[in-house]
Amino acid sequence: MKKHLSAWLSLLLVCMICLLTACGSSGSSSTSAVSPSADASKNTASAIQQAQTVEAEFEMICATTVPTSDPIYMGMDFLGKTLLEKSGGRIKTTIYPNQQMGKSDSENLENLQRNVIQMTVSTTGTLGAAGNIPEFEVFDCPYLFANNEKLFLISEGEVGEMLAEKLLEKTGMRVTSSYNMGFGIISSNKRPILLPDDLSGLKIRTIPSTGTMEAVKSWGANPVSMGLGELLTAIQQGTVDGLTTSPGLYVSNRMYEVQKYGSNINALPIFHFNVVNNEWYQSLPDDLKVAFDESIQEYQTEVRELERQDNVKALQTLRDNGMEITELTDEQRQVFADATKPVADSFGSICGEEVLAKVHELLGQ
């Protein structure tokens, strides 16, 4: 009996050893099968985790009017993580989305100048108004820019540098990057928009930009300047009939709930500059300025791609939620362009003849 028990115990021990060996071998195989890209992701995550254990020396508070689903917020989140890693945890980023710090770009810019927040983004017309710099309005000249490449040629060249210098001198706000949220569509809850006559008499919400408002007037509509935070209620109450903005902002602000018809007229870019408080930036030691500048470059590349992808998805989302989005023909768009020609021809009176002439020269027009 004792011999049989001893034999069974020996057999059980051998089986357990084999099982443990097999398990160890299986784990080793999984580790060696990790791809290089997964390794890189793990290294980045590890670096961010390590940086999070360091006590931050500086905090950058960012504010935006958009929700967390919008590429503006996602870009800020990307910047925060990149900056945390590159600064070794010495710069922490806190983001306030969804109008928590300001109901409009204007309010966020006011908070930025007071150093209540350290970073925000703004449309060009609003930024120009904040510094009384009408030259920023050149980006709102109807049908001046055919695509993003033309826009970035101007924003990153000598015209953009001149505007950044003026803004810094007048307001203490430092331009760090630029991107386009897309070329605006125009919409109504009354009827399809195929020609300017279809806008006749309608009240259309615009950004606070003289150029945009003049373009809307040229199509026979009445422009109404207001922040996106007020817009849903204004349309529900009949104060406004429609709006013009980027497809992504229609989605993130749920405009498909109150708008039935939209048309892709491609007249005006919804162009934005990213700005930081220069006093805060100058307070950074040299090595952290380098980390910040490098992070901003990566952020600009990331947010431009996010916006590009979002525009494609947003148009489909609007259709999926019941909006009738019309892709106008070249002939139909030309009718809109012809209607705005008097506005474009006299746009020098809005943004300044010198800057408009320079943009035309750089664009080869």
Image (tube, grey):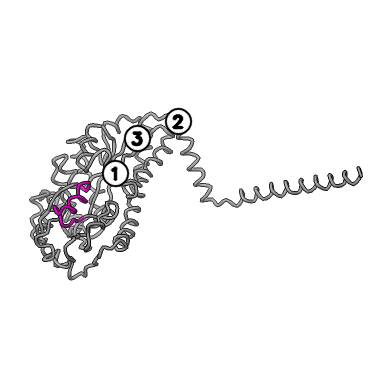
Secondary structure beneath label 3:
helix
Q: Residue 233 colored magenta?
A: yes
Question: Residue 19 versus residue 357: which sits nearer the camera?
Answer: 19
Instruction: Judge from the rendering whether residue 314 lies leftward or rightward of residue 36; answer left or right.
Output: left
Earlier residue among tags 3 and 2: 2
Q: Residues within 10 Å of mark 2 (few under 14, many from 20)?
A: some
Question: Residue 14 versus residue 296: which sits nearer the camera?
Answer: 14
Q: Residues within 10 Å of mark 3 (few under 14, many from 20)?
A: some
Residue 69 versus residue 199 in the image, above or below: above
Q: Image quarter for residue 247?
A: bottom left
Residue receiving disc 3: 289
In 3D space, how far apart are the residues under numbered discs 2 and 1 (Cα atoms)? 29 Å
Instruction: Judge from the rendering whether residue 41 lies leftward or rightward of residue 81; answer left or right.
Output: right
Highlighted magenta segment, given as a residue range? 227-244
Q: Which mark is residue 54?
A: 2
Q: Amino acid at mark 3?
A: Lys
Q: Amino acid at mark 1?
A: Asn
Residue receiving disc 1: 98
Residue located 29% across and 38% down the image: 119
Q: Which mark is residue 228?
A: none
Q: Amino acid at mark 2?
A: Val
Instruction: Judge from the rendering whether residue 211 lies leftward or rightward of residue 245; answer left or right.
Output: left
Residue located 16% across and 44% down the image: 128
